Image (spheres, rainbow, N blue to C red):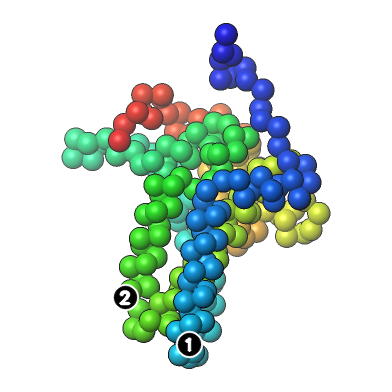
Amino acid sequence: MTRPKSERRPERRSTTLGDAFREFWRHPSPWLLAVAFLASLAARIAVGDWQWSDAVLPLAVLAVFPFVEWIIHVFALHWRPRRIAGVMVDTVLARKHREHHADPRITKLIFIPLQSLFGAFGAALLVAYLTPRTGLGLTFLVTVFGIGVVYEWSHYLVHTDYKPKTWFYKRLYRNHRWHHFKNEHYWFAVTTPGMADRVLGTYPDPSTVPTSPTAKNLHAAKPAVRQTV
């Protein structure tokens, strides 16, 4: 007889960095992002035509990324299902993220859903196409695909049982655990230690924040909501 979901034992998780690394590459999104990164890097080197803008663009993307990550987390991942013009709008990305909050130890739910990842690939390719020259477009792709690999690895690692040993990773680990187990309305950063959260007012003193009753049930969503498209 199958146990109710609430009674199932949590998945065993990696405890060493090597274990985590091997498990990470057993999932499709890291491979897709890594292949896209290496392909765009090879194309960028082959095209040449290096200019100062090829140094400035990655720095600009890295500067705004913490805020882009915050916006995506707040408005896309934590999207509240709602009716718009009589149609229930509830994206795959939001549904999967609610499932991730419901049980943060399920490994497959840690990674970007493939439908959403392919959508992101399409958006990145469109931006690259619209850049004023081919080399700069490829520089953009190298940057965003590289960030994608780092994002997937960082998010995966903080959900394993690997214990942080560096100051930077300790911050990531602690902040993201607060988001999942303390209060889902704060600490939205995943790859940066609270930079955008501090600027945008979602990095409070945790001792002043009550434990949220909906941290594992975002928006107190009913099961029927998950069946909408």
Compared with 3, 42 (above or below) is below
Task: Report if residue 215 is visible in the image.
Answer: no
Q: Residues within 10 Å of mark 2 (few under 14, many from 20)?
A: few
Front one among 68 and 35: 35
Position of residue 226 measured from the top left corner of the image (x, y, whole percent): 38, 30
Residue 41 in sight here: yes
Residue 132 falls left or right of residue 193: left
Q: Secondary structure at mark 1?
A: loop
Quick one: quadrant of the C terminus? top left
To which residue does mark 1 refer?
48
Three-letter amino acid code of the residue under disc 1: Gly
Using the image, determine if residue 191 lies above or below residue 180: below
Q: Nearer the viewer, residue 99 or 45?
A: 45
Question: Looking at this rendering, what residue extends furthest in the left direction?
Answer: 85
Number of residue marks: 2
Q: Secondary structure at mark 2?
A: helix
**Quarter of the image containing the N terminus?**
top right
Residue designated by label 2: 130
